[in-house]
Image (cartoon, helix red, strand yellow):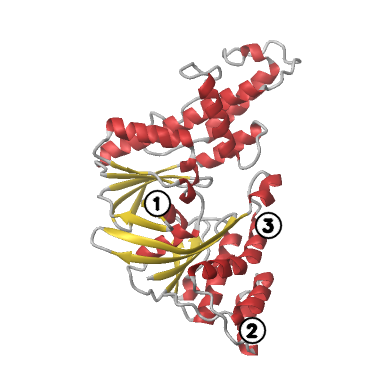
Amino acid sequence: MKILAIETSCDETAIAILDIKETKTETKVSVLGNALISQIKIHEQYGGVYPALAKREHSKNLVPILKTALKESGLLKNEKTKTFSTKDTNKLKTLLSHEPELFELICEELPNIKTPKIDLIVVTNGPGLEPALWVGINFAKALNFLWGIPVIPANHMEGHLLASLLKGVKNGNFTLKKPLFPMLSLLISGGHTELVLAKKWGVYKLIGQTRDDAVGEAFDKVARMLSLPYPGGPEISRLAEKYREKHLGEKSLYPLPRPMLHSKDFDFSFAGLKTAVLYTLKKISLNPASAGSGEHPSKPDVLAKITANIKESIACEFEDSATEVLLSKSERAVKKYKIKTFSLGGGVSANKHIRRSFEKSFADNFPETKLFIPSQTLTTDNAIMIGLAGYFKSDKKVARTSLSRIRAMGNLSF
């Protein structure tokens, strides 16, 4: 099955064209074309993703990266038609009434493109930023109108779950080994922290989630407190790694709490950890000598410089705390549900310390449980994972989803 996948849930505009084939033991995924444009530089000044700007950039980027993906896959064929008919133009204008720039680009570029040999279009419909999601959805609907190719929606988080199962990339080809069930997935990103239980393909149960901040959100907020560049997660990781190299095995000078570490459920909370970092920094500024002692600052009129070493120490302690909580909850769930396959997914799964900690724990404590961690290239938002989610959702058949029922769902869950 050839799939064209579209991802616009946040600040990456991505399109991939996949050829997916099934065998008795595995799923073979050939990436025929893959194009992605990141908006990090645009949102950097805001310290986070600005939805209106994300929507605008998706509208500008989708047609160019569609052409790139089609060209890479060998499916970009020229058509003699130079313009759309008045009827088609009016239909597209109505469909893309909220994306006028996308409408103009489609009218300029797509009349010259012959309908590609694609079986299915898959588009992310949530969770994510709704203005951004709508751009991708309306683009998919426009392609359906022009090319007659069926469209189905895909859950962004299910995409992250499945991406972690892809292994053995070679010349753009992956294999997805069929996991043993029950399977447990920890999905960690800027918007989500979830433990998802699956007893069979496509049947999920959310057994734990954050009650406030997602772990990736906490990473970014702590990074801002430390005056680190956006995105903050990689910067926290970089400083933490530097501190471990210099102070391996030493006790932290600025201890932080492990929120909900001993709660009986599988939920998480990172807002308190973030606040603890804020109070620690304030205390250091007022009186660096008492910052790690638990005492109140004795000279509130004295402001101290937050040195590079202090930043590294706090980054390391914060990362240790978040990792310990994530790992502890996961280990308990693996024991309770007798998990045979465990996967780690989402943008935060790129964190080196988190990856190392899970690899060591499963090697030492759960050697019979198969651990899947995605390649670094598949931890961030991408269209490959969306195509894969759509493939399994379609049940290997061309779905007949009503286009009117495909809507952006910012808070879509499993």
Mark sitting on residue 135: none
**In the depicted structure, whether residue 221 falls above or below residue 347:** above
Mark 3: which amino acid?
Leu
Residue at the disc numbered 1: 161
Rendered-image quadrant of the N terminus: bottom left
Element under disc 1: helix
- Front-most of residues 227 and 195: 227
Mark 1: which amino acid?
Leu
Residue sitting at 40 percent across and 51 percent down?
Answer: 161
Residue at the disc numbered 2: 89
Rendered-image quadrant of the C terminus: bottom left
Q: Is residue 146 left or right of residue 396?
A: right
Residue at the disc numbered 3: 53
- Front-most of residues 16 and 369: 16
Element under disc 2: helix
x%, y% of residue 134?
Answer: 57, 65
Q: Is residue 197 left or right of residue 35?
A: left
Pick whichever of labels 1 and 3 is earlier in the sequence.
3
